Image (cartoon, rainbow, N blue to C red):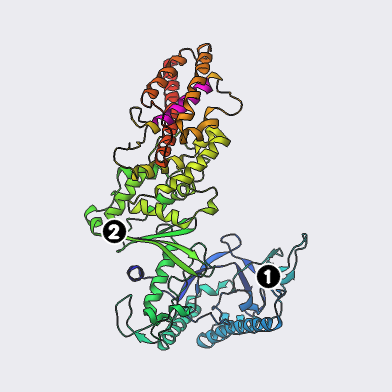
Amino acid sequence: MLLQHLNDFANSRKLLDNLAFKLKAVRWIISLDNAGNLVGQGPVESEGEKKRGKEFHCPQTRRSKVGGGVAEFMADGITAVFGLDTDPEKPMIAKKRMRRDENNLRKFDDFWAQIEQAHEKTLSPALKALLAFKPKPGRIPSFLRWGISSDSKPKEKPAWWITKADGVEVKLGPDHFSFRVEEQLLLEDETHIRSFWRSKFKKESEDHEADAPHGLCLVSGKRDQPIALTHAPKVKGVPNTQAFGASIVSFDKDAFTSYGFEQSLNASTSTRAATAYCTALNAMLEREDHSIRLGQASCCFWTRSKMDATSTWGALLNQADPKAVADFLKSPWAGQEREALKKEQFHAVTLAGNGGRIVVRHWMQTTLENAMNNLRCWFRGLDLEPVHLPTSKETMPPLALFRLACTTVRDAKDLQAEVTAQLFRAALEGAAPSISLLHPMLNRLRVDMARNGSKAMSNHSRFALAKLILNRNRKKNIMEVTAQQDAKAKDAAYQCGRLLAILAEAQAKAHNYQLEGAGVSERYFGTAMASPASVFPVLLKLNRHHLNKIRKSDNYKGHDRFLDEAIQKVSTKIYPFPRTLDLHAQGRFALGFYQQKAANRVGREAAKQNKENNNT
């Protein structure tokens, strides 16, 4: 079903109409004159991404590269263009080195054979100049050298160095080369180069299909179709896969054979359908309006038709800009016909890598209306009054899905694809994330409170996600946590959290907000969250000294009565203090503490505003 919908996506968006060319970064442009002589001291670096170069629509071959010796037309690396090994000093046995050198030579010959064939077909003067430049295989051109940098560092490994047209030398990476003749970039020559390659690519495709067995395509349902023995192209951009891509469907083990059928004949897929679903995934993974990267997983989403109803969803989930989220919640159907969206199908898939294979972590399909309503519920579920207002220095908003997922681990590198898949489902499918996610979140909160005290409250993402998890896993007769503080709630765990925040505020005022060392929240937060009865009697006794100190202070006259009244109101909703709290209750304790802190901030800001208004 997944492959079928991806096939439909590729055909509806006409992604198969121009498969002969694909965007590829080409860093080095070798400039030649009409006689094939090098212009300048070396190649010109294209203006694009640093150390990658500019992306061009480059020819791509249909021939298999598994056996080696196959080069791309007009734009390839140092081995194809010059016949040079990328690492000539790499230690290996003689037999393996010989095979590697033979493969390098075959790739070099294949690259220049395609240039010769194009010249024979087109009689292009530019290609004639290019053939005049053709280097001898393995001979190092004047602008390349193998060795270490001029200001060599200790234990520096040798590498290829390239001298640019302006004489500056830089280290060569896994870069691609192409050519310009008399200011004409050959990759963009529509008259000769690109028209030649279209016919060549068509011939390659026909040869590929002619050699393939025919049968029923299980993806498209069509009969007598050429069956792809292996599915290509590779899907690129999924975390934890090879740079050249990986496969969703593969048949490289004996265990994958049945009834004497080998490779794709076990689950026959036509060459066109295989190309279609791989092309569809590659297209979505390259676009922010169709995919998001979440740690060790990538999530793609699309609609059946060409409607752009989900064009902003990637930004909403990945960036979660507060204004954009607010606008979406107010009017999610803005500029769209609601009746049409009710019938529109929505699809989403979560992918993770495992070396040469891609794992489908989750697959969903529903109506676009349901997905949109679920997304609204997701952001409403995360709505929570913050303790600290966000600053312009924050690079990622607190409600970004990746930032929310990171609250479950100590380091973002430890984030598992299963966690991000759960949150992605919660956002678009309305599912409830596992309550077990609370355990690592609360453990990190205990550690952060002990180390950083009130600074732990700056992690708004942690508390917003905790609120959503608690509410979606809420049992009968358990309180629902609201966006603002619920002072009237009868939940003992929640009120214990509030009480600890009030006691911490009293201690801070008693020391004029200049307390040195750990306070009551830093010292007792973890214990109070797990077993309130063992801590709060001690803290209430200690609080008497704090209230007496506030009473004698000139800065906070009357505040002791206000704090004492607040403590009494909260305490009456708790007594007797619970001996222990389970995981769900510990989460409510943490949110009670957080929301009391947020209420304190709102109260201080309101008092400050009233004072300013009275002065004016």
Q: Secondary structure at mark 2?
A: strand
Q: Amino acid at mark 1?
A: Gly
Q: Quadrant of residue 171?
A: bottom right
In the picture, measured across the screen, residue 153 lies left or right of residue 50, that is right
Give 238 or 111, whichever is nearer the viewer: 238
Q: Amino acid at mark 2?
A: Thr
- Main SS class of the magenta portion in the image: helix
Q: Quadrant of residue 220?
A: bottom left
Q: Is residue 312 visible?
A: no
Write the residue at 38% across / 45% down: 469
In the picture, measured across the screen, residue 103 lies left or right of residue 22, that is right
Say which residue label 1 marks.
Answer: 42
Location of the N terminus (image quadrant):
bottom left
Q: Are marks 2 and 1 in contact (CB under 8 Å)?
A: no
> Mark 1 packing: few (<14 Cα in 10 Å), some, or many (20+)?
many
Q: Position of residue 136 (x, y in %)?
A: 68, 83
Q: Secondary structure at mark 1?
A: loop
Instruction: Report if residue 311 lies within the magenta region.
Output: no
Write the residue at 39% across / 29% down: 495
Q: Is residue 522 visible?
A: yes
> Mark 2 packing: few (<14 Cα in 10 Å), some, or many (20+)?
some
Say which residue label 2 marks.
Answer: 366
User: Where 56 falls versus 461 (above or below)?
Assistant: below
**Magenta stretch, residue numbers:** 494-509
User: Where 282 falls versus 543 (above or below)?
Assistant: below
Which residue, as the protein is rendered here, is positioned at the far left?
A: 339
